[in-house]
Amino acid sequence: MEDILIETEEKTTLVKKKIFSRYQVFVIAILAVMQFTVILDFMVLSPLGAILMPALHVSTSKFGSVVSAYAFSAGIAGFLSAGFADKFDRKKLLLFFYTGFIIGTFLCGIADTYTFLLFARTITGLFGGVIGSIGFAVITDLFKMEVRGRVMGFVQMAFAGSQILGLPIGLVLANHWGWHSPFMMIAGLALISWIVIFMFLRPVTAHLHLRKADHKAFHHLYKTASNPEYLKTFLATILLATGGFMLMPFGSAFGINNLGITLKQLPVLYGITGVSSIILGPLFGKLSDKIGKYKVFGIGTAITVAMVGIYTNLGITPLWIVIMINIFLFAGITSRMISASALISGIPEPQDRGAFMGINSSVQQISGGVASMCAGFIVIQETSGHLLHYNILGGVVIAALLITVVMFYYINRRVARRLHKAAATI
């Protein structure tokens, strides 16, 4: 009898250790790959900036407009689709918008003028900007709050993966076959991902049973957008996006023209930084579930503030020092992304998740677009290529980072109250 009890306890322990089912592991993996293609499509413009600007004869402000075109169109699409986001199977919505994203990315791969590229980026943003919000809605539907830090940690590996694999490969392709080739690579990988999602992802329809049959789309949109608790989160998202979008567009140009890094060294810089982020991402996710998502967010903010202050004031610097600073900078950014995403996912009611995530993504994209445009006006490029006022840009980013710490404190309290209330009703 004692042996049976011991064996039962061992089996129970094994069951507890198995946090995710095989299908859940598949969902995490395919969403990570999908996010990889979407994030890479946006991020690849930053390292290509040093090649693209002289190739198309565009200024820093025009290049900022190219970056912003994606963000603004994504923001518009997010608002327009938010009212319908909870009315359909999330898998079907995902496939629809992913199709448009693939077409837009292909158009970027054949663009030969500034105007055509601006148009292609707009098309890509209209569809690609909604994909992330649908993906996060799927995560919120399928995974409990207690493990979302881990899930976000793995899915956000796409951010680091786009550096370790995508950006270096994209730069190598661009150096050998022109700046169009990375977009063709992304379109091809996205097409493969689309096929896998179509064939193996199960319908995600549980949210449909929580909604009234006569619930009108635009009424649902208005009700979600005007919810006071949701509005506070959207405001926090605005500042969260500001910090990320401002430095990114001119990262490669600053590295080459101000820090003395060569085009051949950029893949090394992004690759090593990406490896460290891939390793740290799941660890930050697990840590946020263990010690608290807000604590990890605060620690990540402190690291990011310090690194932004150092990085944006550098002159000619040895590559190894730039690599070390970037590792810590992206460690801070990654931990903030993971913990913030997990916290935000706990805000909406189940029947509002699609609309909430759509609006939140829209707000993020639009504010990011404004931030990119502002960065283009703050930063000035001399005829020699040297960038001026990058340190001022760093100061603006630091201010936004510090304000978000306060705002996410209240978001964390709101999520904690909801979890406590839910536990009390069980």
Image (cartoon, rainbow, N blue to C red):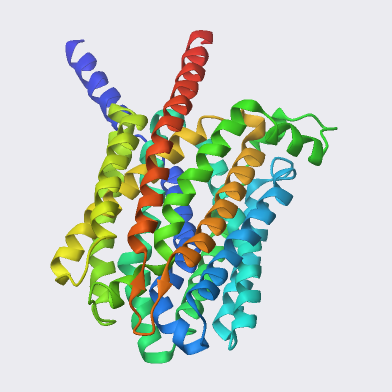
Q: Left or right: 100 with respect to 25? A: right
Residue at 23% x, 16% y: name it: 4
Spot occupied by residue 299 in the image (x, y as percentages of width and height): 27, 37
Image x and y of residue 401, in percent: 38, 43
Q: Is residue 1 visible?
A: yes
Identify the residue at image location x=41%, y=83%. 51
* Above or below: residue 300 compared with residue 179: above
Near-viewer residue (201 or 128): 128
Q: In screen coordinates, is 177 left or right of 306?
A: right
Question: Which residue is drawn at the image coordinates 68% and 46% (left, top)?
Answer: 89
Q: Say how many tags the image has.
A: 0
Q: Is residue 22 above or below residue 346?
A: below
In percent of the image, x 50 and y 22: which residue is there?
A: 414
Task: Give how far across and how far down residue 275 sits, in percent.
Answer: 25, 60
- Residue 45, position in %: x, y? 46, 72
Image quadrant in which you'd find residue 50: bottom left
Q: Is residue 276 left or right of residue 335?
A: left
Residue situated in front as seen by the camera: 308 or 166: 308
Q: Quadrant of the N terminus?
A: top left
* Whether residue 141 is visible: no
